[in-house]
Amino acid sequence: GQNIDQPTEMTATEGAIVQINCTYQTSGFNGLFWYQQHAGEAPTFLSYNVLDGLEEKGRFSSFLSRSKGYSYLLLKELQMKDSASYLCAPFWGGYNKLIFGAGTRLAVHP
Amino acid sequence: GAVVSQHPSRVICKSGTSVKIECRSLDFQATTMFWYRQFPKQSLMLMATSNEGSKATYEQGVEKDKFLINHASLTLSTLTVTSAHPEDSSFYICSGTSGGHSTDTQYFGPGTRLTVL
């Protein structure tokens, strides 16, 4: 398999910062998407990384290290509405599709 | 952003009947559409990839005769679950991409919750 690994659950406090890590198999790796999914709803696109480094989009940033097979999603100034699952979805050459990780369920508390 | 709709949002059917789910791209032409299934507290599992005007490519373990996919136009794909059984109860989600590569950003529909009694 593609060995996508991300924590199952995380908790954080409103207003804080949280980092959600994702590791994956590097062989043939092309790029990686992060999606947010609220319970019972479809995923929504958050970010896309192909090159090493940090991509910043408002309160959300995503980082990629191609050589290490590692990415993280950084959420700043957490809000209650950020409570959701966060899905790491790498894609590899030869696979014309995304493979989703199991997701990290984030609970934001007051 | 790109909008994808699905219909119906929820469906309850009896065992042995067939159910059709529609997926439409509302403001873009989806050259490739994907169908996923998601069981509670699990991630999305890709069922099949379809390109407009051609036969769908099914993932290993997905029965093509049970899950019929049609992608007749650049804005519509349908998934028909034939002879549904309780184990087919799940959340079915479609997505579409507008670029020439299926690894372009996928935009997801709101999902269809199927319950088979």
Image: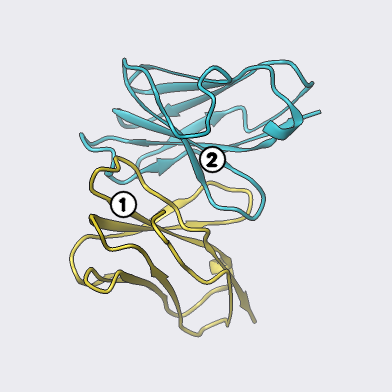
Chain colours: A yellow, B cyan
Look at 23% across and 55% down and name the residue there: A28
Identify the disc placed on residue B110: 2
Give the amino acid at mark 2. Answer: Pro
Q: Position of residue A8 (x, y in %)?
A: 57, 69
Tell me the quadrant of the picture where the C terminus of chain A can be found: bottom right
Q: Nearer the viewer, residue A59 or B88?
A: B88
Q: Position of residue A74 (x, y in %)?
A: 39, 75
Give the amino acid at mark 1. Answer: Phe
Q: Chain of mark 1?
A: A
Q: Position of residue A104 (x, y in %)?
A: 53, 66
The quadrant where residue B63 appears? top right
Label 1: which secondary element: strand
Look at 52% across and 30% down and name the residue there: B62
Look at 37% across and 23% down and name the residue there: B75
Residue B65 vs residue B30: left or right? right
Within 10 Å of disc 2 (Cα), the crowding (few <14, some 14-19, many 20+) is many
- Which residue is the site of mark 1? A91
The quadrant where residue A22 appears? bottom left
Q: Mark 2 near mark 1, Cβ–Cβ under 8 Å?
A: no
Q: Chain of mark 2?
A: B
Look at 25% across and 57% down and name the residue there: A29
